Image (spheres, rainbow, N blue to C red):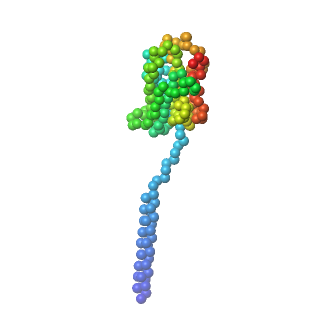
Amino acid sequence: MRLAATSKGSSLTVHRSAALLLGSAVTLSCIIADPPADLPRYPATRPSIVKGSVFPTTDRVVMPPLPTFIVPVELVDQNATFAWNAFVDFDPVTNPLPVAGGTVVPEPGTIDGGVRAVSFSLADISTQTKCHTIEFLVAGSFNSTSPHTPNAPGGDAISWFYNPSGSIDGCPTYDAGRFDASSVVDAPNDVLVDGPHDAVGQ
């Protein structure tokens, strides 16, 4: 009788162990089936212009025939999309719209170390005789009512001076310290990008 009782107790113990193992397996399967946690999101960063590599260089006056402008744009997030606008003689009241612009999306094979090149041409001013300021702005996006105003977290800008004669002789005076609007544009989205558009006589 004692042996039979012992056998019965062992049988119960085996059943309990099997139930525990089954429960553990169910719990484990639920843990494995859960989706992984979201990866941390890094704060948005502004695109920046590689100013030493732009073409033509900004230390010389641009003259006819107008070249194709090439602007390398550097991105911290290589998968980011960015926007750009080009202006000629920008004025927030009388001449607020860009003459060229676009949105650049990431494409395989177009990113070289986080740098993407933007090119644009402005053949429509090549036959004119007055001087012009050509400005290029880049940002993640621009204000919907002001294409010269980058949205947060800001943008970057660069500019060229155009004279049909190839010099600054005979052109309106300008502040030499603002010949190149290459300063970083980190202003809030309600502040216009400052640049050479406010030069005297333009």
| Front residue of this view, candidates 113 and 182 | 182
Which quarter of the figure is the C terminus placed in? top right
- How many numbered circles are shown? 0
- Say which residue appears at 43% left-offset and 32% top-offset: 112
Which of the 4 image quarters holds residue 143? Answer: top right
- Say which residue appears at 44% left-offset and 68% top-offset: 23
Q: Position of residue 199 (x, y in %)?
A: 59, 19
From what the image shows, is residue 129 above or below residue 196?
A: above
Left or right, residue 188 beside residue 10: right
Q: Position of residue 133 (x, y in %)?
A: 53, 20
Q: Position of residue 58 (x, y in %)?
A: 51, 20
Q: Position of residue 158 (x, y in %)?
A: 53, 25
Q: Residue furthest bottom?
A: 1
The reply to whether residue 156 is in sight is no
From what the image shows, is residue 75 above or below residue 199?
A: below
- Say which residue appears at 51% left-offset and 25% top-offset: 87
- Say which residue appears at 57% left-offset and 14% top-offset: 172
Q: Residue furthest front?
A: 94
Which quarter of the figure is the N terminus placed in? bottom left
The reply to whether residue 108 is in sight is yes
